Image (cartoon, rainbow, N blue to C red):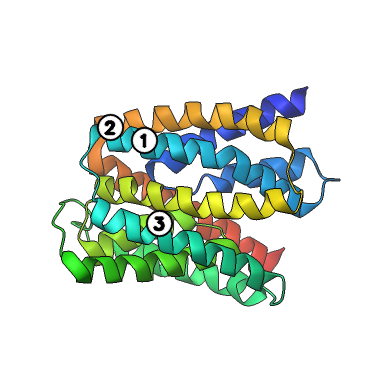
Amino acid sequence: MTDYILLGVAALLAGLIDAVVGGGGLIQVPALFSALPNTTPATLLGTNKLASVWGTAAAAHGYAKRFRVHWGAAVPAALSAFVLSFAGAYTVTHVSGDFFRKLLPLILLAVAIYTFRKKDFGKTHAPVHSGGAEKLVAVMIGGAIGFYDGFFGPGTGSFLVFLFVRFFGFDFLGASAVSKIVNVACNSSALLWFGYSGHLLWQLGLLMAICNVTGSLIGIRLAVKYGSGFVRILFLFVVTALIIKTGWDAFLK
C-alpha cells in the first residue's frame, strides 16, 4: 500500500511538471523502477506510458481551451511523431541505445546553455513559418522527436518545447501547448506497442493516470497564471535535472 501511495504522489508531481515543460518521466519512471524492482523494464515503461498519456492528453485539452493552439504546426508534427515513434520502438529491438545514452547529457547541456545565454529566448510569441514551410518543419521535428521517443525517450517533452521555441518562434507557453499535442501522439503510439506485447500493469497504470491528470491540471493553472517567464525558469530547472540524471546513468552508474 505504501508503494502505491508513493507512486501516486510521483505521478501527480510528474503530471504537474510534464504539463508545463515536459520531463515528468524524470520522476515517474525511477519511482516505478524503485517500487517494483522485480518487474520487467518493458512492463514498467508500458505502465508509465499508460499513466502519462492521460495526463498529457489532459494538458493538451487544457491548453486548447485557454489558448489559440498553433494547429498548423501541431497536427503535422503529431502525425509524423505517431508514425516515427513506432519506427523508433522497432529499431530499439535491433540496435543498442548506448550511443544515445552517452550523447544525451551533452545535447541537454547545449540546450541549457543556449537557453540561459539568450535571455529573451521564448519570451515573445512571433511565429516565423506559415503554409507549406510550417508543415514541412513540423513534420521534420515531429518525426525526429517521435523516433527518439520510441527509441530512447528521456527528455522528449523538453526537447519539443525547445525546438518549437527555437525553430518556430513560439514563446514558452505556446511551445508547451503544441508540444503536449505531439507528446500525446508519441505516447499513444508507444502505448499501442506495449499493449500489443502485453507489457502493461493496467490497474496500477490507471490509478497513476488519475494522479497524473490531477498534476497536469495543477501544472496548467500555474503556467497560465505565471506565464512564459515561469515556464522558462522551470524548463531550465528540469533540463538541469535531466543533465545530472542522464549524465550519471551514462558515465558514472
Residue 40 placed where, x, y %? 81, 51
Closer to the camera in the image, 185 or 62: 185
Query: Which residue position holds label 1?
Result: 61
Q: Residues within 10 Å of mark 1 (few under 14, many from 20)?
A: some
Closer to the camera in the image, 198 or 226: 198
Asked which secondary structure carries label 2, the reply is: helix
Q: CA distance from mark 1 to mark 3?
A: 14 Å
Q: Residue furthest right?
A: 38
Q: Which of disc 3 and disc 1 is earlier in sequence?
A: 1
Q: CA distance from mark 2 to mark 3?
A: 18 Å
Residue 55 vs 90, above or below: the answer is above
Instruction: Tell me the quarter of the image containing the C terminus.
Output: bottom right
The three-letter amino acid code for the residue at tag 1 is: His
Residue 107 placed where, x, y %? 46, 70
Closer to the camera in the image, 66 or 83: 83
Q: Which quarter of the figure has residue 210?
A: top right
Query: Which residue position holds label 3?
Result: 78
Q: Residues within 10 Å of mark 3 (few under 14, many from 20)?
A: many
The three-letter amino acid code for the residue at tag 3 is: Ala
Report if the CB atoms under discs 2 and 1 are less than 8 Å apart. yes
Residue 131 vs 180, above or below: the answer is below
Residue 15 placed where, x, y %? 50, 36
Report if the CB atoms under discs 2 and 3 are less than 8 Å apart. no
Asked which secondary structure carries label 1, the reply is: helix
**Label annotation for residue 65:** 2
The three-letter amino acid code for the residue at tag 2 is: Lys
